[in-house]
Image: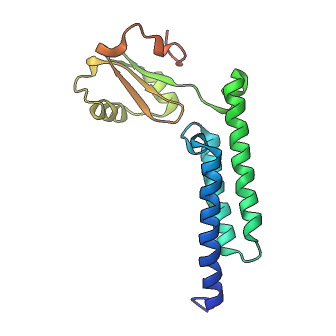
Amino acid sequence: MLAGSELDVLRIVGVGVLSYIGMVVLLRLSGNRTLSKMNSFDLVVTVAFGSTLASVLIDEKIPLTVGLVAIAVLIMLQFIVTWLSVRSPGFNRLVKTRPTLLMLEGQMRKDAMRRVRVTEDEIFGALRKHGIGDMHKAGAVVMESDGSLSVIACSQLGDKAVLHRVDGYP
């Protein structure tokens, strides 16, 4: 049977609506940090959310309450990891990568770029996105823990204090 029975379709619609509402409520209760782009653990949790939700929707043997409990466990684990990260520098280093300096005062750091697998074209794209047309006017380009590229113009670099915890800063 291609389409399944009407009962199957109604179950998916009903469970889909209820699990969606439940997931939104749980995520709202857990706070903004649960869905922030911070580290690889966040990606794992996001994929697990999707997988759990899909399983609850498709597999009629999995009750809605079991799916919501699974999502709540993932949110709780995410909360614990972020709580520990804020309170323990050692744990923070374990679950998060450090930002990496890719360019300083117009000079690309080729070794760092290779290590984090960033190309010159990606650096140039970040510079353009931040309105910098001359790479020598780029004070710093940093790959952040979430994989994004931050750009600081030379005129805004100041005493470079923001670079003190960045890998590759002298």
Q: Compared to 87, does 73 lie above or below? A: below
Q: Position of residue 124 (x, y in %)?
A: 31, 31
Q: Position of residue 144 (x, y in %)?
A: 49, 29
| Front residue of 4 and 86 | 86
On the image, which quarter does residue 149 sit in?
A: top left
| Front residue of 67 and 96 | 67
Figure disc tally: 0
On the image, which quarter does residue 88 sit in?
A: top right
Q: Coloring scheme of the render?
A: rainbow
At 25% across and 26% down in the image, what residue appears?
132
| Front residue of 84 and 99 | 84
Is residue 72 rendered to the left or right of residue 152?
right
At 25% across and 30% down in the image, what residue appears?
131
Residue extending farthest to the left is 133
At 65% across and 73% down in the image, what residue appears?
15
Q: Position of residue 31 (x, y in %)?
A: 61, 43
At 30% across and 35% down in the image, what residue appears?
129
Q: Compared to 144, does 17 lie above or below? A: below
Q: Compared to 119, does 54 lie above or below? A: below
Is residue 84 rendered to the left or right of residue 162?
right
Is residue 49 rendered to the left or right of residue 121?
right
Q: Position of residue 10 (x, y in %)?
A: 61, 84
| Front residue of 115 and 104 | 104
